[in-house]
Image (tube, rainbow, N blue to C red):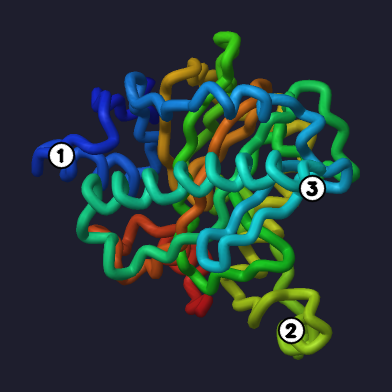
Amino acid sequence: MDGLETIYIEDWENQISQDIQNKAVTALEAGKVVYFPTLAFPIRSKEQLLFSPEKVDPKSKNISYDLRNDRLSGTSSVGEEAELLKEMIRRYATTCRKFVDKLIPIYTRGLVQARTSFRPVEIAGRKSPSYRKDDTLLHIDAFPSSPTNGHRILRFFTNIHPDGKPRVWNVGEPFENVARKFAPSVAGPFLGSSWLLQLLKITKGYRSLYDHYMLQIHNTMKGDAEYQKNVSRTEVRFPPGSSWMVYTDQVSHAALSGQHVLEQTYHLPAGFLQNEQTSPLKVLEKVLNKTLV
């Protein structure tokens, strides 16, 4: 598959050669999924009891952890079980960060660690309150309440399913194709709407023109039934014991099935990229011929 770059690394602690570093960053910024088929995250025996969808709060999609304030949310677990859950996700958060710093050292100074999640709920058959929140549809990541102002969204995943079930994705067309298809028809925001959204705390910060376009592209992609039916895509199966990383603001993707996955999100200012011209911000500015941040 052209959109997949496979790298064989078996230990999170191993040193990583310059050749592999270059291979990883070039593939990521080109809009590929970087796949580590032999990079498993070790689960301790006492943590096996955490592998149940019932550990997720019914009001949440996933269990979330913020390393910055050591806060766990989105879980029905309490007491010792909640502490065990927190420790497992915290271990993943710190392990991932050390690994990414070694894999792509040019990102280290700019990389901001965001939330870590544990996803024990099966995706297939899960009901979404709106098509906008249905991640089984092809989309690029953009969030209504969390503007990025052009910062990248980098995500690292590991399948820890205890019974051999893969995480199944579809990977769609390149971002520039998506942008050229949807961006020109997006209407601009109402005058003053970004300030009002921030004032009313609907958004966590100012929604830039870039964020406006990305969110509308996200929503329009998901809402276009003909596009979802006919656009080219490739199915990718990530088995237990494998990991992968991807710029989810750039790679059109859909999660079709699977459960028991750990995920770490990072944000990166576009200026820290090896090639800033590959960023969605620069691509959208080229397509629309306007400055967006």
- Would you name the residue on which mark 1 appears? 16
Residue 40, given in percent of the width and then of the height, sits at 39, 25
Question: Most extreme residue toward the front, as rendered?
Answer: 80
Residue 289 drawn above or below residue 156: below
Tell which circle, 2 or 1, labels the residue nearer the N-terminal end: 1
- Would you name the residue on which mark 3 appears? 132
Q: Which amino acid does label 1 sit on?
A: Ile
> Cα distance, mark 2 to mark 1?
42 Å
Between residue 201 and residue 259, name the one nearer to us. Answer: 259
Q: Residues within 10 Å of mark 2 (few under 14, many from 20)?
A: some
Q: Which quadrant, please, contains the N terminus?
A: top left
Residue 249, given in percent of the width and then of the height, sits at 52, 52
Question: Most extreme residue toward the left, as rendered?
Answer: 18
Q: Residue at x 35, y 56 (%)?
A: 278
- Would you name the residue on which mark 2 appears? 198
Residue 211, given in percent of the width and then of the height, sits at 61, 68
Q: Do the residues labelled 3 and 1 touch (CB within 8 Å)?
A: no
> Cα distance, mark 3 to mark 2?
21 Å
> Cα distance, mark 3 to mark 1?
39 Å
In front: mark 3 or mark 1? 1
Q: Is residue 150 left or right of residue 137?
A: left
Q: What residue type is labelled 2?
A: Gln
Between residue 143 and residue 36, name the one nearer to us. Answer: 36
Q: Is mark 3 on a helix, strand or loop?
A: helix
Query: Total marks drawn?
Result: 3
Q: Residue at x 57, y 61 (%)?
A: 70
